[in-house]
Amino acid sequence: MTEDSQRNFRSVYYEKVGFRGVEEKKSLEILLKDDRLDIEKLCTFSQRFPLPSMYRALVWKVLLGILPLHHESHAQVMMYRKGQYSDVLHALKVVRFVNDATPQVEVFLRMYQLESGKLPRSPSFPLKPEDEVFLAIAKAMEEMVEDSVDCYWIIRCFVNQLNSKYRDSLPQLPKAFEQYLNLEDSRLLSHLKMCSAVSRLPYDLWFNRCFAGCLPESSLQRVWDKVIPQDSSDAIVSKAIDLWHKHCGTPVHSA
């Protein structure tokens, strides 16, 4: 039996006995052992498989650029990140924007506002819609990442990526949603249109917050695993090909 056959046999066996992610976990552990992490392989892995919870924060920090690719630099870089976190937090306490009783997600928001030059003149000023989005994401992330420093940096970089990479695509997402739903369940889409419910779906809540507060934690983690990689073009192409095969048959050029 060849090595590939053995691996396939093990994968089928593990899935039947309820350990579906065993092979994927081993593959990720191999990737994480490299002296210099391969960002492309980590991106590909996170697009194809859900990340094991024990490695999720580490992989997210690498993919978001919080940590460098070289293992030997991780400790020193995180020491700098922690120092910056402490400095920003101290500054907010000095100007009395936060105190020890301030909820952690609000602390994260004020830190982000200060670092991005958007701190209001008073903490009593009403929150903007973008602040509400940040708080929703921060609240969900706080449930996933235990360490406060890690949590803030992941939220900070994740929100920045959403704003820079996906914000211009948001107006097109409701239409894309309808197209996907038509392919996957046309009867449901027809029913929603008949009830005049399509236009009333909470698109802003879903897409602006990247489903934070809309999905259970386990499902949200898997969605964010796919969003966090810097370049998801390969995954988009693969999804398009899969849908073509499923609904339209085999493309002519591949025959």
Image: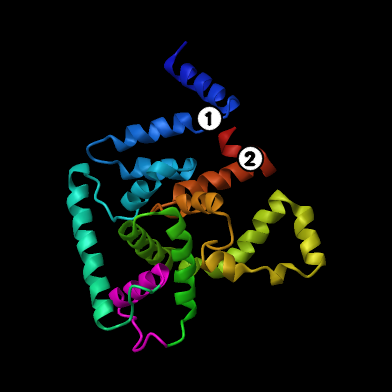
> Which amino acid lies under the numbered mark 2 shown in the image of this protein?
His
Mark 1, secondary structure of its residue:
loop
Q: Kindly identify the residue that appears in the image at 38 percent across and 36 percent down.
A: 28
Residue 60 location (% of width, % of height): 37, 51
Query: Please, is residue 55 above or below residue 89 in the view?
Result: above
Front residue (pair 238, 210): 210
Q: Kindly identify the residue that appears in the image at 18 percent across and 43 percent down.
A: 72
**Magenta residue span:** 103-124
Horizontal relation, residue 194 to residue 6: left or right: right
Location of residue 160 (image quadrant): bottom left
Q: Mark 2 packing: few (<14 Cα in 10 Å), some, or many (20+)?
A: few
Q: Residue furthest front?
A: 101
- Say which residue label 2 marks: 245
Location of residue 96 (image quadrant): bottom left
- Say which residue label 1 marks: 19
Mark 2, secondary structure of its residue:
helix
